[in-house]
Image: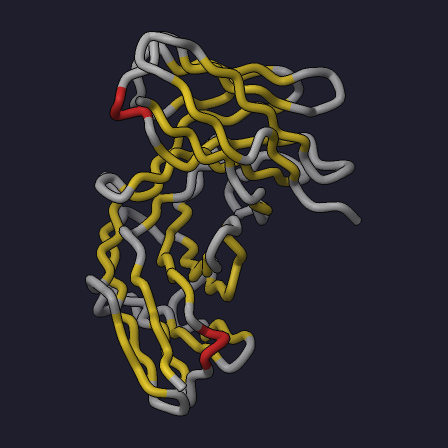
Amino acid sequence: KAGVTQTPRYLIKTRGQQVTLSCSPISGHRSVSWYQQTPGQGLQFLFEYFSETQRNKGNFPGRFSGRQFSNSRSEMNVSTLELGDSALYLCASSLAPSGSSYNEQFFGPGTRLTVL
Amino acid sequence: GDSVTQMEGPVTLSEEAFLTINCTYTATGYPSLFWYVQYPGEGLQLLLKATKADDKGSNKGFEATYRKETTSFHLEKGSVQVSDSAVYFCALYNGGATNKLIFGTGTLLAVQP
């Protein structure tokens, strides 16, 4: 079974531009979460989607947004890029959202975004 | 709010040495605890987990015991290999209507032959 795939793997943008990152979950997984990884802040939760609906959002500005399609694929968008947005963006999928017990999330390799 | 604290790296060991990476947490209730590993250029992989107090998670020679009295989940391995070189993240999940994992800052382990 193929794992979580993320495209592109590497991106270089300049300040003020916008960017869209894509995530294809494992087949049959309907829940997708996004995380930002930086040397200074570590791994921080961005948002999660299930059935095309955003269920939760982390503490990030409105420039960060996302969506999920009917085939469970997800995209995240960052508008008006800032230097501090340079990071590894990780996508994780699970069969369903976690509730009282944890449904294991499987992580993709990430998209490395560099903002110049 | 909930948080995870793990020891700063890098940790540099010789092959076959004993490994300990410390992790403590702050959380209400009874979180599930995890260790994830990230190899260079790859995403995170779940290494082991424990869902209740006194549980021991184990995988690939790594172990960690959920200690509620000390709010700790230290990662140990008796004999490390060069192939264990990676970044290790301690994390918790504390329920509720969210998939959100809370991670520690990560510890880089470098094993020398």
Relative to B14, is B50 above or below?
above
Q: Which percent across, then down, holds residue A36?
A: 38, 34
Relative to residue B104, is residue A93 drawn left or right? right
Q: Is residue A33 above or below residue B67?
A: above
Task: Name the residue at 64% across, 16% down.
Answer: A52
Colour basis: secondary structure
| A57 w.r.t. A4: above or below | above
Taking B15 as reference, is B74 left or right? left
What percent of the width, then of the height, locates residue A5? 65, 37
Residue shown at 21%/69% (left/top)? B70
Which quarter of the rendering shows the C terminus of chain B? Answer: bottom left
Q: Is residue A52 left or right of residue A59?
A: right
Which residue is at the front of the view, B87 or B104? Answer: B87
The percent position of residue B71, horizontal first and vertical second, equals: 25, 63
User: Which quadrant holds residue A113?
Assistant: top left
Q: Is residue A93 left or right of residue B56?
A: right
Q: Nearer the viewer, residue A18 or A13?
A: A13
Residue A70: x and y, percent? 73, 16
Task: Give the number of marks.
Answer: 0
Q: What's the residue at 29%, 43% (across, down)?
A: A42
* Residue visible at 33% across and 81% down in the picture: B19
